[in-house]
Every structure is written in C-alpha cells, then in structure tokens.
Image (tube, rainbow, N blue to C red):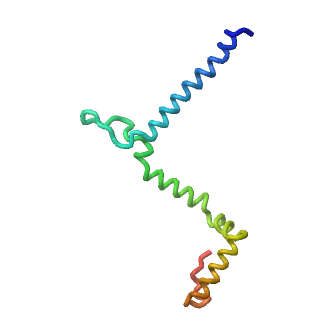
Amino acid sequence: MNFYNIISIASGPVIGAVIGYFTNYIAVKMLFRPRKEVRLLGVKLPFTPGIIPKRRAELAKAIGNTVGNRLLTKEAVLDVLLRGDAANSAAMEITNAIFESELSIGELLSLIHI
C-alpha cells in the first residue's frame, strides 16, 4: 500500500468527522442561543430565542416530573433511609421527635402516611 491509497482511505472518515463536528456545534448553539428574541427591521428572526430558553418552563416541569416519578420514588427513598447509618440516624430523630412532642403515640402514628 502506498501513501496515496492510505490518504484516499482515510480521507472519507476524516472529512465526515469534521463535517459532523461542525454540524453538531451549530445545532447545540441553536438550542441555547440567542437567549432573547432577535428582530431585524421589526420582523422576528426565525429560531430566536433558542429552543431551550424559549421553552425553559416546560422543560423544567418535565424534568421535575421525571425526577419525581422515576428517580425519587417512595420505594427508593425508603430503601436509602432504612439502610445502615441512615436508618440509625432516622430512628434517633424519630425517637427524639416522639419524646419532645406533646402529642400521644396514637396521634403521631396517625400523622405517618407510608
């Protein structure tokens, strides 16, 4: 294999990588920038503001719902609390709360919704 064959074989992937890098760079820039609406002669330019700043309230709500429903489930929180040091710490806090409370044990248990 000579040098020109190696160049011809390697040039396709290298050119593809360069083009892919620049298109991804532009796409990410278009997602986040500009942060505010841009007008030219009173006409709003398309794709301004970027999709993330424009719909940040919807995105925040969707991320919050996903974290609340998928990551911080009741079972996951209980699993962490009932393991090792966290369980001992939680038990101490509950014990202290019971002794410092003016409520009866029955009233305290009625407040727990597990």
Position of 42 relative to 8 (above/below): below
Q: Residue at x 51, y 28 (%)?
A: 22
Between 23 and 85, the one lying in front of the other is 85
Residue at 61% over, 86% down: 98
**Above or below, 31 relative to 86:** above
Locate residue 2, reporting x and y percent.
72, 8
Residue appearing at x 45%, y 45% in the figure = 52
* Residue at the spot 32% in from the left edge and 38% down from the top edge: 38
Residue 58 lies left or right of residue 88; in this view the side is left
**Quarter of the figure with the N terminus:** top right
Q: Is residue 28 left or right of residue 48?
A: right
* Residue sitting farthest toward the left: 41
Q: Is residue 53 left or right of residue 7?
A: left
Q: Nearer the viewer, residue 83 or 44?
A: 83
Q: Number of numbered discs present?
A: 0
Q: Quadrant of residue 80?
A: bottom right
Instruction: From the top left corner, tell me how far across and down residue 42 is, in percent.
Output: 25, 36
Q: Position of residue 37 (x, y in %)?
A: 33, 41
Residue farthest to the right? 1
Quarter of the picture holding the C terminus: bottom right
**Residue 87, above or below 45:** below
Q: Compared to 97, does 18 lie above or below?
A: above
